[in-house]
Amino acid sequence: MHPIIYDVAVSADGFIAGPNADISTFPSEGDVLNDYLARLQSYKTVLMGRATYEFGYDYGLAPGDNPYPWAESIVVSTGLSLPDGAPVTQLRDLTDSALRELRQASDGPIYLCGGGHLAAQLMNMGHIDQLRLKRAPILLGGGTPLFDGLTQRPRLTLSDQTDYGHGLIYQAFIVG
């Protein structure tokens, strides 16, 4: 069974995007970005919520397009409409059995690509195995929290850490 890894940038006050899904203050160049892009290539399946998927529309993604063409992309949503034959799969019912089936069927690690609400759902269900945080020295004051609706408090064990300077830190944790 392959791990689900939540790999995300987060502000010092715990947000993955500011108000109106603003991500413009997060670092967008340098070693932290290069390392993230290298990690992206290792993921074989990408799991995201509807809002995260539709966020791509602002950057030229068309409905049904796969934003990660090297991987299988799955959007968790009951309200999303995708064109017939779209290379993106829609998962309408986020159940324990659906997640176990996904973890067994994937060709490798699964990238949880955001959505603080979806991340909280998966963490509450015990389906996040690793947490990879690119911690930015910024304050957003609001927006999308890292976990929106977290009710479980799993133990985190630090497994890796890189200091990129200027307050930018990458931390990887094993969950459980």
Image (cartoon, rainbow, N blue to C red):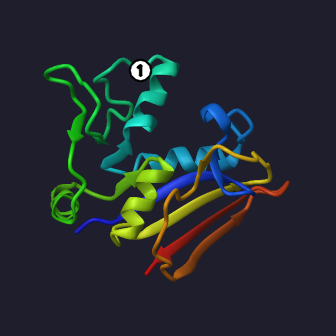
On the picture, is 14 further left or further right than 45? right
Question: Where's residue 98, x and y in %?
Answer: 17, 58
In the rendered view, would you say 77 is above or below 165? above
Q: Nearer the viewer, residue 164 or 145?
A: 145
Depth check: 3 or 97 in front? 97
Residue that protrudes farthest toward the right in the picture: 166
Q: Is residue 138 left or right of residue 51?
A: right
Secondary structure of the residue carrying tag 1 is: loop
Left or right: where does residue 37 sit relative to residue 5?
Answer: right
**Image quadrant occupied by the N terminus:** bottom left
The location of residue 164, given as percent across then percent down, is 76, 57
The three-letter amino acid code for the residue at tag 1 is Leu
Residue 95 sits in which quadrant?
bottom left
Residue placed at 69% from the left, 65% from the top? 162
Q: Residues within 10 Å of mark 1 (few under 14, many from 20)?
A: some
Residue 64 locus on image (x, y percent): 28, 24
Q: Residue at x 65, y 51 (%)?
A: 15
Q: Give the number of callouts.
A: 1
| Quadrant location, the C terminus | bottom left
Residue at (47, 71) in percent of width and height: 151
Residue assigned mark 1: 61
In the foreground, 166 or 98: 98
In the displayed structure image, the side of residue 56 where residue 36 appears, left or right: right
Q: Position of residue 152 (x, y in %)?
A: 46, 75
